[in-house]
Amino acid sequence: MIIEPRMRGFICLTAHPDGCEQNIKNQIEYIKSKGAINGAKKVLVIGASTGFGLASRISSAFGSNAATIGVFFEKPPTEGRTASPGWYNSAAFEKEAHKAGLYAKSINGDAFSNEIKKQTLDLIKADLGQVDLIIYSLASPVRMHPTTGILHRSVLKPIGGTFTNKTVDFHSGKVSEISIEPSSGDDIENTVAVMGGEDWKMWIDALKAENLLAPGATTVAYSYIGPSLTEAVYRKGTIGRAKDDLEATAFTITDSLADIDGKAYVSVNKALVTQASSAIPVIPLYISLLYKIMKEEGIHEGCIEQIQRLYADRLFSGKEIPTDEKGRIRVDDWEMRPDVQEKIAKLWQEATTENLADLGDLEGYRSDFHNLFGFGFAGVDYKAEANEMVGVESIA
Ligand SMILES: NC(=O)c1ccc[n+]([C@@H]2O[C@H](COP(=O)([O-])OP(=O)(O)OC[C@H]3O[C@@H](n4cnc5c(N)ncnc54)[C@H](O)[C@@H]3O)[C@@H](O)[C@H]2O)c1
């Protein structure tokens, strides 16, 4: 079929298998171009199909020759209906990994469930024996709690008062003011239940109980802080409470791994266009200004550049891992540079529908958004028939 983008708000209903494959190939090339990383060799990535988790899987496999197991929740294709992009990404990743002689298997299902955890544990037991790196990179709006059966929904709301600020519809470029009502009822608890640290700890506990963690195993989850501009809706909002909980869980996990000399870290990453971040109000306007400044300064990075730097300069540099006063690894250091943030704060005041295309990098935002779904890649013939029925080679 001929596959075109079909946009609905901050989602695209179609994905292009050849474009997703090109995206994977580009990321692999980038990792290879940066040279070998003396990193972990048996890696489990939870949330491995898009964004930071996908970049982590690619960095481990093609930077460190690692065997990888990827867990994700994606929609396979049916005749005439494309798969979700993470499916095609994973298909292309496995194809390239297998071509390179690397072990790569994937599990598609709800990572929050006991069933998927058990399936993953069984696969590690059968194929790898133990893992030495576990990347936790889930971004989900809902979580069915495996013991209570309660379906928790996360919300992106300020706490304590209505938040009013500028935002942009990145498709039309229209800058407008939005007001977001504060959280109420169980909003905070629900958001913490979905995006906090409980599930991360459940994974590590389950792996440890079955003796599947290698001595000195490391686990890393991803977090975000961001500037004061977005604080009310992000770091001091409901999602921020979940990130506080995730960050605190790193210490609990490290304590629980003392006997195997294991460690849990949170890495604070940069704001980037992913399916998760495009759903958060105000963030697209911030990102379009951030991209503009960071590109001008020559310090712009995508997910793959961020994770390459996390691995090469922080986690596996051979030196002590640098952390901030709260024990977090920071690869948002360039985003948070005072000179970068001062410029954004100024542009933020000036941004209007009429001038945003010049002031900000709206084009860069849109292009990244299209790329998420496999559209807009050089070298792909989008007018040609594409086969939507692509399978992932080793999937359970
Ligand atoms: N995007 C950003 O700007 C940004 C910045 C810093 C940190 N982070 C953090 O990075 C992490 C990953 O976010 P992302 O932006 O890469 O998101 P993403 O949407 O690109 O990826 C989410 C991944 O989780 C998987 N997933 C979702 N629900 C699942 C489920 N129930 N079971 C199994 N897999 C499931 C998806 O299949 C996908 O692989 C999040 O913790 C996020 O807060 C994101």
Image (tube, helix red, strand yellow):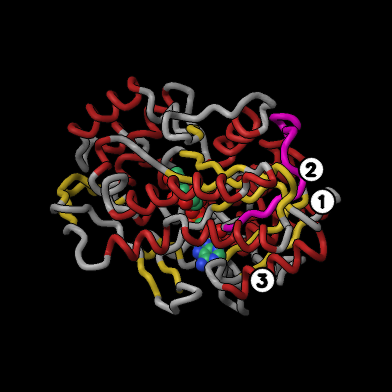
x, y percent for residue 40: 73, 42
Does mark 2 have its CB less than 8 Å from ligand 1? no
* Tags 1 and 2 touching, CB below 8 Å: yes
Left or right of residue 85, residue 394 in this image: right
Give the farthest residue toward the front. 259
Q: Residue at x 33, y 22 (%)?
A: 338
Label whose residue precedes the other's in the sequence (1 or 3): 1
Q: Residues within 10 Å of mark 1 (few under 14, many from 20)?
A: some
Depth check: 177 or 234 in front?
A: 234
x, y percent for residue 179: 15, 54
Of the residues shown, which amino acid type is indicated by label 2?
Asn
The magenta stretch spans which residues?
Answer: 32-46
Instruction: Name the residue carrying label 3.
Output: 118
Of the residues shown, which amino acid type is indicated by label 1?
Leu
Tell me the distance, in whole angstroms, between the alpha carbons under discs 1 and 3.
24 Å
Asked if residue 23 is positioned above or below residue 149 in the image, the reply reads: above
Label whose residue precedes the other's in the sequence (2 or 3): 2
Instruction: Residue 365: tell me if it is visible.
Output: yes
Q: Nearer the viewer, mark 1 or mark 3?
A: 3
* Tags 2 and 3 touching, CB below 8 Å: no
| The magenta stretch spans residue 312 | no
x, y percent for residue 254: 56, 45
Q: Residues within 10 Å of mark 3 (few under 14, many from 20)?
A: some
Tell me the distance, in whole angstroms, between the alpha carbons under discs 2 and 3.
26 Å
| The magenta stretch spans residue 40 | yes
x, y percent for residue 32: 73, 35
Q: Nearer the viewer, mark 2 or mark 3?
A: 3
Of the residues shown, which amino acid type is indicated by label 3?
Lys
Depth check: 29 or 60 in front?
A: 60
Q: Residue at x 44, y 79 (%)?
A: 149
Instruction: Name the residue carrying label 2.
Output: 65
